[in-house]
Image (spheres, rainbow, N blue to C red):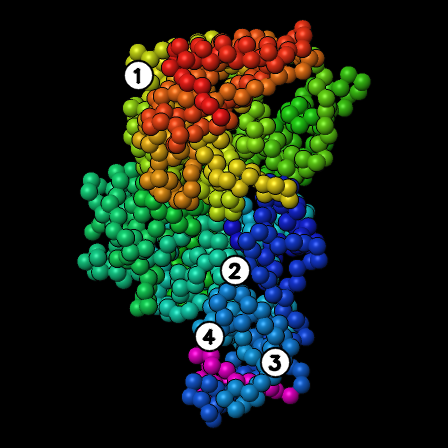
Amino acid sequence: MRLPLSWLRDYVDITIPPEEVAEKLTLAGLEVEQMEYVGIPRPEGLRMGRGERPELAWDPTRVFVGHILEVKPHPNADRLTLAIVDYGRSAPIQVVTGAPNLKVGDSGQKVAFGVEGARLFDGHEAGWKPMTLKKGKIRGIESGSMVLSEKELGISEDHEGIIILPDDAPIGEPLVEYLGDIVFEVKINPNMARCASVLGVAREVAAITNSQLHPPSLDVVAQGASIKGQVDILIQEPRLNPRFTAALLRDTEIKPSPFLMQHRLKLAGMRPINNIVDVTNYVMLEVGQPLHAFDYDKLYARAGHRPPTIITRLAEPGEELETLDGLKRKLDPFTILVCDTRGSLSIGGVMGGAESEVDANSKNILLEAAAWDYINIRRTMAAQHLASEAGYRFSRGVAPSQAIVGLKCAIELMRQVGGGEIARGVIDTYPGKPKKIVINLPIAEVKRQLGVEIAPKQITKILESLDFQVKSQKSKVKSKSSNLQSPISNLQITVPDYRLDVDGADDLIEEIARLYGYANIPISRMNDELPPQWTNVDLEQEEQVRDVLVNAGLQEVISYALTTPEREALLGATHLPSASHVRIGNPISPERTVMRQTLLANLLDLAAANLRYQTRVALFEVGNVYRRRSADEPLLPRELATALPEDKELPVERRRLSIVLTGPGGTISWTKTDTALMDFFDLKGVLEELLEGLHLSGASFVAAENALYHPGRAAALVLDSQEIGVFGELHPLLREKFDLPAQPVLLGEFDLDALLAPVSPLFATRALSRYPVVTQDLAIIVDENVDADRVYALIRQTGGELLQRAALFDLYRGEPIPAGKKSLAYTLTFQAMDRTLSEQDATKIRDKIVNRLRHELGAELRGV
């Protein structure tokens, strides 16, 4: 939420620097993510946030509030004019301008005015290009100053016309003093939804800084006829719509809002439309109560030229509504609507309808302020893929008590900016009025939970600063040493009607801790015996996998466990389990509707995102995947120890390991770098290092065919005759679907439970030999269909204990190797534990290996 400091000052006295206000709010749980300085110089040493728009400090000696004395025609250009501007310093200055909102004969307007030497943004250039005002001739007329638009001042990108300030703007005042501001970018977490308004943040500032809060005035100048008989309200679903209020303004004028209202709305990130719509947005931002304005005459006509009846009800089967964004929406049965006797008018709490919207011809305005069930609003927004500022607030919870506050503030402000008469009274239908919440708070419980003793007087002060009503209750047990009553033991707390997040002592203690200051709560050692520590084998094995992969040069990522079926479908149906997805009953977003069945879709998305900024990606993820459990599917051995009978109804949850590699083999360095792109064998090498790190033997790699992978470039990892997973190069067509560059992308996904099942905490080691090694090369010719793994296995078996290592270093096809044959070359390393081997010893073993390869594989020794 964007919050201008000048607006905040309307509701609370701020006597400390804005930077300190931001720090205190953040420490109290209301995080200020950024501070945007509009015209005001940013303090030295306070850096701009990443992605922020460039800022421009308005020089108080060169940018002023100006006064247009006269506008004359330009002698040499029809689209230019000459403006004579008084800026309260020396003689008035003549400037050349092409502003469309200044016409020949105009006078008296207050404007933003920059003189020669002022630093501004170039309004005619795209983006934010700084410039300095210099004297020059424009179509023969000298001009060195400028009447300014919002673009030149860096307020917004609007360059359609110059800024016209209010009539009471003081001539000659530095513009930074009149219009300069600081905008807080405040993160509203779910537990702080009450602060999604200027008033909400002001309450926090007042409590944190012990400052005076100035609540909004609810006085309304209502001189029209009574609203009774002019509109009726009927609520059919009190649970979903506990309160509905309405007020009526007649004979108002639709026109642009006052400049300062528009300016604040723009700083808050909203687009001004007209005075009536702007007031609904302004008051929503100000007090946190969303509102909606109806054209009363349209409602009157729909009702057969009789007073309309506003009805809130659930949508009927097949009902549709065209909303203000121009879309015709098919409504769900659970959607709560605002209707009249002819049909639906708006989606309650989310967005209005097109048929009854306020337009340039509107004259009589019916203003609505209501309360809605936040869970139903969330559900509606998700189903309709519809987000709005009103929905944002209602979906987090707006107390019914605030409806009348927003209604009175807004209807009076509409009268002030548009004229007209307010009907006396309001319609207030309130079937779901909640009871007051009164909580008993034992003082001892505060100390027990926070670990620090806070005096009852201080607790009372903290809670009262947050608008809680506090009554002290003394203990009935008298002190043994005197006849005096014992100290206060309990506090009886009445919760403010706008606080939906407080309903128990724990919530109150959290509020006390926030205002007391988390930094003031001392660190305490546990005054008890440590509980017994049990080994978590699953977690330790997972950490072992992570350590090996990180040491191999990969980086771990953690992605969302929620996704969409459409995103995973990009991988192809053959890769996903046959069982259906586990669907979320109330998804938080259209992009998070099901539990993932694979890690690969998210991992490929992350790879694509990272490749926008770097050329090499080596990622892995260890996480769970989910699918529906079949009726006869057993639990895993590791699940049986803690299984409950009802677990058989839960989805299947399995651990997976996924890896993605792409880009150059080595990272950029001043030393020699491997710039060749990674291929299948790089991923195979990572897996071999993982198997070695887990001390697993008996693994093999078998050629595999899978639609996910490039033909001929995939293999299955097999361990003890069980397939653990498939890996290889991503198919080029799938690579394009995930917006990946045209280069090999290696990936694989493995059953982590199956991979770790044979891992033992104990493994055999052998001493290092102190005798030298003997190395010899062996090159053989075999049939094309003979796997290198089969050759390697025979070499290791035949070499016995003296053969320490066999490494394939060359694969060759072509002349002089016969067609249908290939050459494999190995380096053999021999070493004994008890003696120095001679070349003859090594040659004898090598010959034995050659004979076995010849006998079993038909291999031939390749000549030099």
Report, in whole angstroms, how far the alpha carbon at label 2 lies from the one at label 1: 55 Å
Q: Position of residue 102 (x, y in %)?
A: 46, 81
Query: 10 Å neighbourhood of mark 1: few (<14), some, or many (≥20)?
Result: few
Residue at (47%, 93%) from the top-left corner? 75
Report, in whole angstroms, how far the alpha carbon at label 3 lies from the one at label 4: 21 Å
Mark 2 lies on a secondary structure that is helix
Q: Of callouts 2 and 3, which one flags the residue occurring earlier in the amino acid sequence?
A: 3
Q: Amino acid at mark 2?
A: Leu
Q: Amino acid at mark 1?
A: Ser
On screen, residue 83 versus residue 716, left or right, reads right
Question: Which residue is tagged 3?
Answer: 134
Q: Of callouts 2 and 1, which one flags the residue occurring earlier in the amino acid sequence?
A: 2
Report, in whole angstroms, how far the alpha carbon at label 1 lies from the one at label 3: 78 Å
Q: Nearer the viewer, mark 4 or mark 2?
A: 4
On screen, residue 616 versus residue 783, left or right, reads right
**Quadrant of residue 419 within the rendered picture:** bottom left
Mark 1 lies on a secondary structure that is loop
